[in-house]
Image (cartoon, helix red, strand yellow):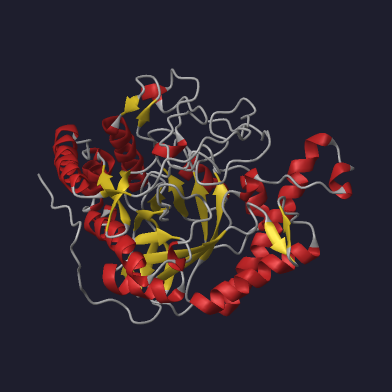
């Protein structure tokens, strides 16, 4: 079945004019989220907008209103058409209201809590010390301000603290260094999770209408979360485990008994063995991921504790490999290895940071924004998201097979439209002059899935404990 690509379509519909109430409740069949008493299953993206030639510090909302609206229309009309309903991020309140009113999308407001450093009293601290009282108060105040600013914004769904901060416990303090080497990381993690729970309590006091959770890197330190975060409403997880999530949901159900939101998951579209774009392998993996999420939704035969997920990511970002250089080159360098992404696991580094988008991006622009091309993975999501997991039973979920021919046809139509648009577009940047900068490197400590691709690449070699699946 062909679907129309709404490149220039605006939609209007009735939406909330103020912040609706979000509740999470446990029933005999599992956990469920409701918005104004209506069931709500999260289907969306960790959306950001980064043009070719720009990098991680680009701010779309500092551009002219004309450019902002063109960029939102380019992306959000397609997300809306796919059946998406949620974005993970905090945007200016004015634009969150605009997005909700024009595209019907909701927001999980997310601040990284110093995951990539903090500026305190005008001084940047690259390694956040969660044991320092001044730092803890700074992060708490950031959250107080965020909640007060956004608690009545239409479309607000929930709050999420951090972004896999458990992978960034790198600060040095004498108190921690005096501990035996094997206890240092856990001691640091205790400071982190105790802070998260303190923030969660303050968020609830300021806004009792919206739930609050954390964003953890997979299930590392789950036992500490159980002990130190009793007041969170959900566990957000960034997880990359191949075509399914193995025992993730069952572990959380058994140990924590809280619902789970997949805050990040995905697969790249570059085949590291065949050295070419591989849309179908990406689409098949994305399809299988979401079938597994549906499987663990309430009343569907699994753990019954999945409230939905956010796909990483919307469009390719060409800055991921070089961070500061080669921003206008679509690199094919592998960044890390994961054996459970089996289609190209024979490569030494089979996870390609700059190719995780369900849309490819062109260096050419139209109306001031870069053209994008929905890949087969976009259509795989569209075909699944039009079905609500709450309306399916376990047998129906197991029949949600990957429609290879259908998504291939849809992808082919997308390419034809994209080529037509490109022929009428303009090149938007000049190739950069060659620069000589040290490469950013990291090691994975022998593990398979220790660093997920949402964050900034560390500027020094590091390792973290392995995760056994």
Camera-side residue of 256 and 106: 106
Determine the image quadrant of residue 378: top left
Give coordinates of residue 85: x percent, y percent: 32, 61
Determine the image quadrant of residue 191: bottom right
With respect to residue 461, does 86 lie above or below?
A: below
- Circle count: 0
With respect to residue 168, does 154 lie above or below?
A: below
Left or right, 133 with reference to 342: right
- Farthest residue in the top direction? 346
With respect to residue 258, does 152 lie above or below?
A: below
Give coordinates of residue 119: x percent, y percent: 70, 61
Identify the residue at horizontal 24%, vertical 54% (top origin): 82
Left or right, 423 with reference to 65: left
Identify the residue at horizontal 52%, vertical 35% (top origin): 434
Determine the image quadrant of residue 445: top right
Q: Is residue 201 visible?
A: no
Give coordinates of residue 446: x percent, y percent: 62, 25
Left or right, 425 with reference to 208: left
Identify the residue at horizontal 25%, vertical 52% (top origin): 385
With respect to residue 318, does 135 lie above or below?
A: below
The quadrant the N terminus occupies is top left
Q: Is residue 166 visible?
A: yes
């Amino acid at each position: 079945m062909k679907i129309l690509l709404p490149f220039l379509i605006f939609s209007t519909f009735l939406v909330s004019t103020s912040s609706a109430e979000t509740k999470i409740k446990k029933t005999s069949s599992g956990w469920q989220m409701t918005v104004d008493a209506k069931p709500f299953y999260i289907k969306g993206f960790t959306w950001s907008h980064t043009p070719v030639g720009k990098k991680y510090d680009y701010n779309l909302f500092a551009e002219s209103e004309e450019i902002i609206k063109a960029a939102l229309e380019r992306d959000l009309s397609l997300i809306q058409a796919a059946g998406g309903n949620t974005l993970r991020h905090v945007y200016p309140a004015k634009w969150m209201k605009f997005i909700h009113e024009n595209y019907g999308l909701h927001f999980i407001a997310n601040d990284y809590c110093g995951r990539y450093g903090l500026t305190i009293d005008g001084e940047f601290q690259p390694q956040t010390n969660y044991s320092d009282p001044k730092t803890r108060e700074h992060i708490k105040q950031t959250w107080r301000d965020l909640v007060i600013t956004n608690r009545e914004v239409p479309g607000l769904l929930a709050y999420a603290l951090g972004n896999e901060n458990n992978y960034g416990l790198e600060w040095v303090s004498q108190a921690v260094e005096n501990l035996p080497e094997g206890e240092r990381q856990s001691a640091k993690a205790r400071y982190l999770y105790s802070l998260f729970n303190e923030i969660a309590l303050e968020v609830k006091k300021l806004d009792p209408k919206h739930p609050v959770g954390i964003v953890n890197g997979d299930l590392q330190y789950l036992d500490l979360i159980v002990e130190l975060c009793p007041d969170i409403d959900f566990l957000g997880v960034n997880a990359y485990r191949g075509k399914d999530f193995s025992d993730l949901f069952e572990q959380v159900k058994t140990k924590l008994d809280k619902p789970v939101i997949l805050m990040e998951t995905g697969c790249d579209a570059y085949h590291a063995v065949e050295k070419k774009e591989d849309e179908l392998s990406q689409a098949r993996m994305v399809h299988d991921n979401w079938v597994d999420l549906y499987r663990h939704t309430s009343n569907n035969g699994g753990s019954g504790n999945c409230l939905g997920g956010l796909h990483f990511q919307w469009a390719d970002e060409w800055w991921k490999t070089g961070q500061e250089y080669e921003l206008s080159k679509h690199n094919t360098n592998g960044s890390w290895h994961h054996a459970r992404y089996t289609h190209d696991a024979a490569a030494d580094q089979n996870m390609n940071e700059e190719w995780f988008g369900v849309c490819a991006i062109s260096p050419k622009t139209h109306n001031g924004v870069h053209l994008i091309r929905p890949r087969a993975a976009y259509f795989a999501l569209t075909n699944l998201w039009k079905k609500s997991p709450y309306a399916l039973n376990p047998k129906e979920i197991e029949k949600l097979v990957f429609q290879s021919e259908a998504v291939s046809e849809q992808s082919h139509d997308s390419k034809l439209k994209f080529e037509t648009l490109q022929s009428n577009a303009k090149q938007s940047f000049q190739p950069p002059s060659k620069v000589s900068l040290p490469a950013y490197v990291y090691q994975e400590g022998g593990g398979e899935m220790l660093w997920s691709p949402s964050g900034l690449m560390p500027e020094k070699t590091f390792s973290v404990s392995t995760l056994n699946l």
